[in-house]
Amino acid sequence: MKCTRNRSVIWAAALVLLGSFAAAQPQPSELTLVEVQDDLYVISNPFVPGNVTVLLTDEGVIMVDNKFAWDYDNMMAMIGTLTDQPVKYVINTHYHGDHTGGNEQAQNDGTVVVASENARLKMIEASQPGLPDITLDEHAFVHLGGKVAEVFRFGRSHTDGDVVVYFPEHRVLTAGDMFTYGASVPQLIDYAGGGSARAWTRTLDEVLRLDFDTVVPGHGDVTNKAAMAEFRDQTLTLRIQVRDMLANGSSRADIEQMLRNDYNWADLHVQRGLDGLIVEAQ
Ligand SMILES: [Zn+2]
């Protein structure tokens, strides 16, 4: 995977990935609707900031993630084209602002917000609005209208509070930023948020034991389990590459350049991930 992308675009994406409210432009994204199955949709946008999963039932809607606050009205309008039912639950895959930004407005509309306890703690630390109402440590079922979304937290990866949401009847998994798909959205290890390159591979191994075909990544196009398995392998390759460079006496600057060249890391990936990765790779 060689660097061919426009750095400024990647930089903008990286800012949004961490939910830097001050740096991101508070303008609604242009949203698109992707039908995954007849009752399961993804609200996406051409590049940033990522995917929202929508499960329709006769008794309401379950959403996974909800972008930024300024995207809320457009998201709701789009869901309104699919169903008259209200959104009963939104599950946040992790604490970053581009996945939790709609929480406060959702709660005002009567939606219950679900996340991991670790994600909630990070939201408190970051003084984010819309704290989750219900949290889980490892596993929860969200039942609605005869359908179910299973929520799992297997361990550290992008942060220490990432969950995946599994729709067993649909054989679909929503992965959050534990899995980003495409060269323009590289792996971001948020050490300040409890992320871990070493744990990431193991965590994905746990996720890949679930029985699913389709994967909704945190950012990037809807894809399949094989692509997620490839990403898993890359999390290991990256760490081994850094370990070998350290063993061969490479400097921090050498490693940074390799990550920029081979893995499309941008400034923010370096700022948030490089020092922690060097410690973990040794
Ligand atoms: Zn994120």
Image: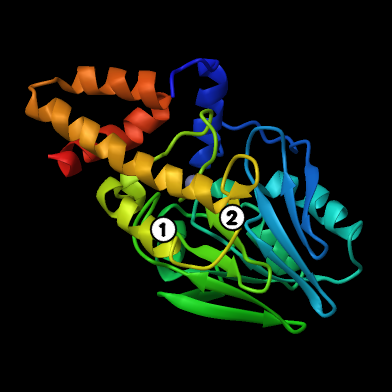
User: From the viewer's perspective, is residue 221 above or below residue 65?
Assistant: above
Amino acid tagged 1: Lys
User: Residue 14: image x %, image y %?
Assistant: 49, 32
Instruction: Name the spot of residue 158 as percent of width and height, x first.
Output: 40, 49
**Dot 2: few (<14), some (14–19), or many (≥20) neighbours within 10 Å?**
many
Say which element carries label 1: helix
The secondary element bearing badge 2 is classed as helix
State the mark number for residue 100.
Answer: 2
Which picture quadrant has residue 84?
bottom right
Q: Earlier in the sequence, mark 2 or mark 1?
A: 2
Along the viewing direction, whichever of 57 and 124 lies nearer the viewer: 57
Mark 2–mark 1 distance (CA, rounded to whole Å): 12 Å
Which residue: 29% across, 46% down?
197
Residue 265 visible in the current orientation = no
Which numbered tag is attached to residue 122? 1
**Left or right of 247 in this view: 70:** right
Q: Looking at the picture, does residue 257 appear above or below residue 243? A: above
